[in-house]
Image: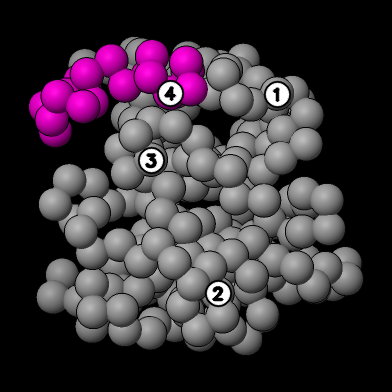
Amino acid sequence: MALYAISDLHLAFTTDKPMDIFGSKWLKHDEKIKENWINKITDEDMVLIAGDISWSMRANESKVDLDWIDKLPGKKIISKGNHDYWWSGISKLNNMYENTKFLQNNFYTYEDYAICGSRGWILEGSDKFTEKDKKIFHRELIRLRLSLDKAKEYGYEKIIVMIHYPPMNEKREESAFTELFKEYNVEKVIYGHLHGPSLSNVVNEEHEGIEYIMTSCDFLNFDPKRIV
């Protein structure tokens, strides 16, 4: 039994959104993911998928993509990304599958770890940060704290956080998210969102006692990474 992670699958089985416009390495990327997944992951394993699951805009369209994920080996925990417009109510999502569950204001477990998380958002201090972003940013902080509080309420001390957006900027400056990680003694943080040239700015190492793990599928060469 092992714990893996990968994010930014950007599946598009029902939409015309070929990912190879972002480079030849994305050509038939779903086939690469599936082959690598099947070669290493068993039904006893768990895979964390931190956002940007499907390009679909509506829930009924995304089901084909989600069915594809659910049929792969292992248990899956999915959190929301900035492109997951199909995301509907959390209760509805969690009633869809037995081995695929969705993370929002709640937590899941892997052995003695609690799996917590939220989508995250553009960081305060970024050039792109606007007054509109401020409300979403603080809402995501609240959601992450709710998730962490629930894990602590049930007595979990070892915590892994799933977050889609990078919790630090390209200068590795602290944010309200990293402060929350330290407050709750988070052990590992998996994140994605970055692609192409932005991958040169990733933090993929231990920083102030927390292991940050970059899981965008192009960064991982479309191969889920074992994290525990």
Could you tell me if the residues under marks 1 and 4 are in contact, i.e. CB atoms within 8 Å? no
| Residue placed under numbered mark 3 in the picture | 220
Question: Which quadrant would the N terminus be assigned to in this image?
Answer: top right
Q: Gap between marks 3 and 1, in whole Å?
A: 19 Å
Region in magenta: 17-36
* Image coords of residue 41 (percent x, y): 64, 26
| Residue placed under numbered mark 4 in the picture | 33
Lower sequence index among marks 3 and 2: 2
Could you tell me if the residues under marks 3 and 1 are in contact, i.e. CB atoms within 8 Å? no
**Quadrant in the picture for residue 96:** top right
Q: Gap between marks 3 and 2, in whole Å?
A: 20 Å
**Can you tell which mark lies on residue 210?**
2
| Residue shown at 47% from the left, 18% from the top | 34
**Quadrant in the picture for residue 112:** bottom right
Three-letter amino acid code at the position of disc 3: Leu
**Element at label 4:** helix
Q: Gap between marks 4 and 3, in whole Å?
A: 10 Å
Residue 9 is a magenta residue: no
Lower sequence index among marks 1 and 4: 4
Q: Gap between marks 4 and 2, in whole Å?
A: 27 Å
Lower sequence index among marks 2 and 1: 1
